[in-house]
Amino acid sequence: MSSIDNFHSAINSEQELEDSLSKPTDGAIDSIAKLKGTLLILGIGGKMGPTLARMAKRAADAAKNPLRIIGVSRFSKPELREQLESYGIDTIACDLLDPSAMSTLPDAENILFMAGWKFGSTGSEEFLWAMNTHLPALVAERYKESKIVAFSTGNVYPYTPVESGGPTEDAPTEPVGEYAQSCLGRERMFQYFSKQYGTPGVIIRLNYSVETRYGVLLDIAQKVYGNKPITLAMGHVNVIWQGDANAQTLQCFDLCTSPTRIMNITGPETLTVRWIAQQFGQRFAKEPIFEGSEEPTALLNNAAQAKKLFGPPQVSTEQVIDLIAHWIKNGQSIHQKPTHFEGRTGKF
């Protein structure tokens, strides 16, 4: 059953949206049922963390597993902390780069690492590297006896011919720009400590998770709706509904190995930006405006391994497009954080 069946392809409020994004699949419930002790989520305050944590909690409840779930963040927005605690998720306010902070965190058998930095990093490259490479080393050392599932990004891959289907996990990395380079640094730290200590782990190369308030599809939809030009230079993308990305992430705890395993997570299709814009154009009764032309390469990601292990995403691209179009036409709130996916310089 699709995670949006109860909404009949329309989500009308943030509560309904977050209920959908946090609804666990059978696979997520089965995986969480096997975890013991504590699940510590580092960097829970990002766009994906709250619904992923809530899905883990709902999965644990469904499995009758007394798993303790703790979310760690600076919590610059107190209301997020209150919301998480209302779901039964414990919280700790912490600046993870504080030298004394790591020692104050509780031990945990299972670590989900979501901390990192991207937007606004140009001009603050030293902080970028501290967050994306130094911090992972601290975490890998501190939690060397735990399972660690860590988020990375498909940005570590080179630009790939669009007809290739995207790089698989064994493809060589060739990150463009310091953000992507620092993310590869993150991976290398987890890989190093996994080999040193035998720490079992999975590194998730994700691109791109989308929902109605944020993401590549929303960026394109807003430009169509607002009669603004859509740049075609990065003319092809992969996307996955955030609820599906959440569920697949939780299932990665079943797959932790030493050396650390790499896992691509994204949707099954290579989508053209032109087609996406035309789909929104049909739903908005507007003609998309394009500028430039498609380059023969793009930043892509082949998730054939994830599809084999987890099955296809439960929410299709067409369903997500319907949801976003309905959300925009109803004037619902968005995060106001463009992804800048169309850029080809690697600067954010």
Image (cartoon, helix red, strand yellow):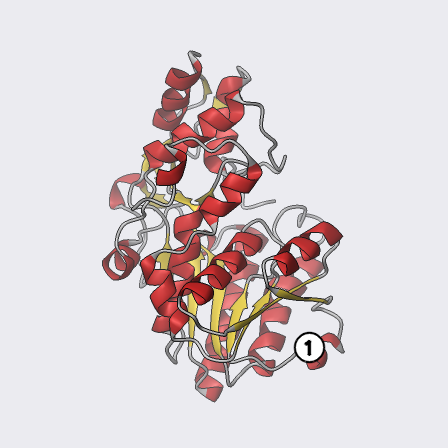
* Element type where label 1 sits in the image: helix
Question: In the rendered image of this protein, does residue 195 appear above or below residue 340?
Answer: below
Is residue 177 something one can see in this rendering? yes
Q: Position of residue 196 (x, y in %)?
A: 48, 87
Does residue 274 appear to the left or right of 47 in the view shown? left
Question: In the rendered image of this protein, does residue 322 appear above or below residue 289?
Answer: below
Closer to the camera, 224 or 137?
224
Question: What residue is drawn where x is 56% and y is 38%?
Answer: 14
Q: Quadrant of residue 204?
A: bottom left
Which residue lies most toward the left here? 308
Q: Quadrant of residue 304?
A: bottom left
Question: What residue is drawn where x is 46% and y is 30%?
Answer: 324
Q: Position of residue 80 (x, y in %)?
A: 67, 52
Closer to the camera, 324 or 156?
324
Question: In the rendered image of this protein, does residue 275 appear above or below residue 107?
Answer: above
Does residue 114 appear to the left or right of 318 in the view shown? right
Closer to the camera, 47 or 327?
327
Q: Position of residue 292 (x, y in %)?
A: 45, 22
Question: What residue is drawn where x is 54% and y is 38%?
Answer: 214
Q: Position of residue 31 (x, y in %)?
A: 37, 68
- The quarter of the rendered structure image containing the C terminus is top right
Which residue is identified by label 1? Answer: 102
Disc 1 packing (10 Å; few <14; some 14–19; many ≥20): some
Does residue 46 appear to the left or right of 221 in the view shown? right
Q: Amino acid at mark 1?
A: Met
Number of marks in the rendered image: 1
Closer to the camera, 75 or 124?
75
Is residue 262 something one can see in this rendering? no
Which residue lies most toward the bottom here? 197
